[in-house]
Amino acid sequence: MRLRRAFGSPNFCVSMELCGWGRYMASCYVYGAPVPGVFMPDLGQAGCILFWGYNPSSSRIAHAAATAAAVQRGARLIVVDPRDAGMAKKSDVWLRVRPGTDGALALGLANVMIERGWYDAAFVRDWTNAPLLVRADNGRLLRQGDVAPQGDPKQFVAWSEAARAPVVALPGKTADGSAPSLFGTFDVPTPDGVVKCHTVFQRYAESCNAYSAARVEQICGIPRDDVVRAAELLWHARPVAFYAWSGIEQHTNATQTARAIGALYALTGSLDSPGGNVLFPAVPSLDVSGLDLLPKPQRAKSLGLAERPLGPGIGEFTTSGELYDAILDGNPYPVRGLVGFGANLLLAQPDTRRGRDALEALDFYVHADLFMSPTAQLADIVLPVTSPFESEGLKIGFEVDADAQSLVQLRKPVVPPRGEARSDVEIIFALAKALGLGEHFWGGDIEAAQNARLAPTGLTLDALRSKPEGIRAPLQSRYRKFEANGFATPTRRIELYSETFLNHGYPPLPEYVAPLVRPEREELSQKFPLVLTCTKTTLFCETQHRALPSLRRRSLHPKVFLHPDAARARGVAAGEWVAIDTPKGSVRAQVELDRTLAPDVVCGQHGWWQACTEIGAPGYDPFSDEGANFNLLVGFDAVDPVSGSVPLRSYVCEIRRLSA
């Protein structure tokens, strides 16, 4: 990030829209901060744990171990996942959600909780914008300036039952000290006449009311009793710690789903409390991301920002679709060069063939990587990178829990680098010097740079080298930190209702919108009757390591998981090869039966291309319909309107038996 900003580029293509949007950026519109992105689940003290589209058994082993320990001591566990995988097998309630319908489930759970009074009314009243009044005429929040000629146009208004009048609402209280109404519709006198207003919570509750447990069962395929049971646990087993990841992010409705889950979590009142999601203290260190090095006018040129003003471009994050458009079509301006660090775009992003065309069209492309991947093969220059075992690595705090956050560790290399390989950091510093940017990189001195990062901690590289197990900084956790200054949102409260969204033409309340590409669409129903989602295998790291014999022997071929009924209806059996056909393309995979899947859901695997010559295991052409590249199956024709997220986990398909 520092090199990019020092160079002057506002574009950073790191898959934010696929792996981080929901837990980081979209959640900021609710909380003003990434929840759960940096507000980590306090699993050690949680009474109830909610994992949504997140399987720590595959993604974060520390969370899996902590969850197992929590369950053993009596914590309750709810898992939302189309598959009975990982921690779902240990759960009290497994919610087998139909891919892409998570938003309806979140609204349905909230509906049960509101109807039955299973919510923290004091927290909701004091720390969300639930009691604020919304004008019925234009949907905007009522301000004091609307009510009184001399009123402050920046102060928001709630309804005081005691005064039977609108009063200024401050975070945690009202100006007259009374408790504001959470529910109600009121006629508010203004200089321009009487304006009908509803509380935000009234509007939110009415929106959730459309998703009864019965309707959730119809949309999501989850038995209504399980919906009620999950809602009951979220209330009665508090405090609730939760985590959501890419399972909710790779959909055309990812933003509204993340907002709906954020609003649901607010009902529990568990935020930043022991056993909830806590912003644990961090070891102080120097921020080296270089935000000050890129002028604001240049930041405003981030690809996609004009079309999606609330999307990843706000943080200078560029989607792959936006990158390809800029390279191939010059929209909104031509991109001619690219520097890649380890990203295998063509296997990790949709529309692989368009991605290949884009990379081939670049004037110059340099790629740094461990492996000569299909993406690296298109580069003009490939720079070999060391593995973690060959290079030193500094980590200041580990985002797991309070104890892990306090650990500062310098990983020592185990073996010397092979050939000409250098670490990513060495390559970055060398590029900075060659580009004349050495002044921003401590004159190219990595040791000086890392010591500068460490300076606020009081530690040095030499001290850490003497203690390879790491050194813990003295940190003290504080809770409910929002009580000091509220939240970093326009209302200084958790925003169930977002005027920011309203101002940009998006629904101000979280709402469920069905996946844009779904089997129920008339033009797709006959040809593609199945819902397609995907997963990764725990043996490999994303698109890497299928060339390692010890791993590949345990998973020789790409799999596609089917319910036995779906397989029987198509005349296929376990172990047979089939084609996965979608409106965008076709790939091949070997059938594996999974009774835990819904009969109309198919689960593929992404990341297949590498051969393992030592055991004769084949590779797969990533650009061919005869290959196994899952991302050939999905394009950019349907994306989330806010984030540009693509439906890698909720698309449509048919399974076709291949002749022997």
Image (tube, rainbow, N blue to C red):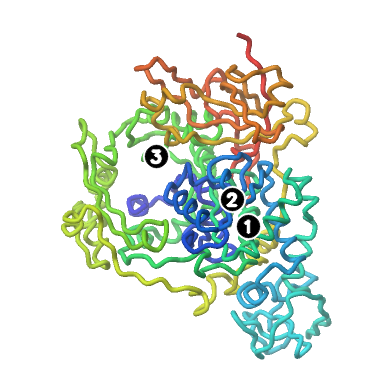
Check if mark 1's residue and mark 2's residue have beta carbons within 8 Å: yes
Q: Of the residues under marks 2 and 3, which one precedes in the sequence? A: 2
Query: Residue at image x 65%, y 85%?
Result: 174
Q: Is residue 505 left or right of residue 41?
A: right
Q: Which-is-in-front pick, marks 1 and 2?
A: 2
Of 136 and 412, which appears nearest the observer? 412
| Quarter of the image where one finds residue 647 | top right
Q: Is residue 446 left or right of residue 244?
A: left
Query: Residue at image x 68%, y 63%?
Result: 502
Q: Position of residue 453 (x, y in %)?
A: 27, 61
| Quarter of the image where one finds residue 180 | bottom right
Q: Is residue 438 above or below residue 374?
A: below
**Which residue position holds label 2?**
52
Of 193 and 139, which appears nearest the observer? 139
Q: Position of residue 384 (x, y in %)?
A: 28, 33
Q: Is residue 199 above or below residue 546?
A: below
Label 2 sits on a secondary structure element that is strand
Kindly report the distance in space between the C-alpha atoms of the residues bearing marks 2 and 3: 35 Å
**Which residue position holds label 1?**
261
